[in-house]
Image (cartoon, rainbow, N blue to C red):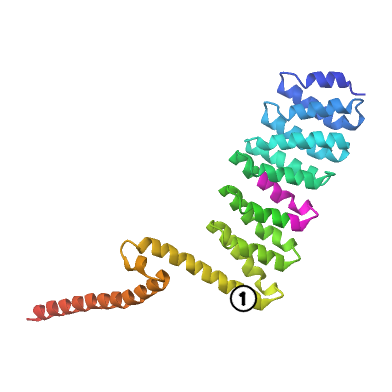
Amino acid sequence: MVDQSNVHERTFSPSLDERTDFLQQLITCFGFLPDRQQALEDIIRLCSDEDKTLRGKAINTLGTFFIELSGTEKEKVWNRLLELLRTEDPEVWKAVALSIVSAFGYMPEKRKAWDFLLRLAEDESSYVRTRAVEVLILLFPSMPDREKIWADFIALAGSEHGEVRELASNAFILIYPYMEDRKQVWESLLKLSGSGDSHVRDRAGDIMVRIFHQLPDQKKAMQDVENLTLRQMDYISRRALKALRDDYPELSEAGNPAEELYRLAAKKAPYARRKGSGTAGKGQRASGKERTGEKQ
């Protein structure tokens, strides 16, 4: 029989070897210890050990034992794992992420846990926001409500934080195959196609291309694409008008500046071609004269 009081005291030892050895004893005998609550507290404390290898091992242990814990114990361990999301050591972070993924499947209130991670995705710390979204991407296959997941990632793609938008939109390719309602996917991506973030627009467009031929109403889908093209052309026109207004005052005075822009483009393009050909002609004539002079 293991002397638990001795094991507990040794977890405070200044010797790394002793702390590591007694963590292993806790792991081996966890199910047979008289005071499992104390053993769990010791493992949780070692998750903050100064040695990152020991920290990682203790964190992995929480994920492994999670299935054996009571409801209260699960909540305590889960909260500790969420606190550890803030760790900035890559190796320890990996252990935290894997333990969260292992534990999530046995969480009685998955929606509550998921929503907490969503809130962390808007944390004031860029590091925490990034880690929270990365964990959400790892967890989504374990969430039963796929429509909520999709809606949440669409919302994250509209975040005010660039790193959140990028990670969320990158995840579309992983999530959309789980969605049965292609029309719902199309409509939500159509809204994102007007995003001010080009990365989000591109990722939305990638999925729209993939599902276009799976849509029930092809005629409407084609109309959506045409409208989208017109909106993007309108955006380009507005940018061009802003850039050219100082050089071409007539754009500001025109009743329809966009039409005036197209008229100017049509007017200037032939001129540019003539100018180019004229320059080329002069060059050819000059070369001809030089060659004539050489012959003389």
Q: On the picture, is 113 further left or further right than 129?
A: right
Q: On the picture, is 33 further left or further right than 46?
A: right
Residue picked out by circle 1: 222
How many residues crowd mark 1 within 10 Å: few (<14), some (14–19), many (20+)?
Answer: few
Image quarter in which the N terminus is found:
top right
Q: Is residue 8 above or below residue 274?
A: above
Q: Tell me the magenta residue range.
A: 132-148
Dominant secondary-structure state across the stretch colored magenta: helix
Q: Position of residue 254 (x, y in %)?
A: 37, 70
Q: Where is residue 24 in the image (x, y as percent from the top left)?
A: 80, 29
Front-lying residue, 211 or 217: 217
Q: Residue at x 71, y 39 (%)?
A: 95
Q: Quadrant of residue 70?
A: top right
Q: Residue at x 69, y 46 (%)?
A: 118
Q: In this view, does 127 lie above or below 53?
A: below
Reply yes or no: does residue 123 show up in magenta. Answer: no
> The disc labelled 1 sits on which kind of residue?
Met
Front-lying residue, 33 or 152: 152
Q: On the picture, is 193 further left or further right than 77?
A: left
Image quarter in which the C terminus is found:
bottom left
Reply yes or no: does residue 135 show up in magenta. Answer: yes
Q: Residue at x 77, y 43 (%)?
A: 113
Callout 1: SS? helix
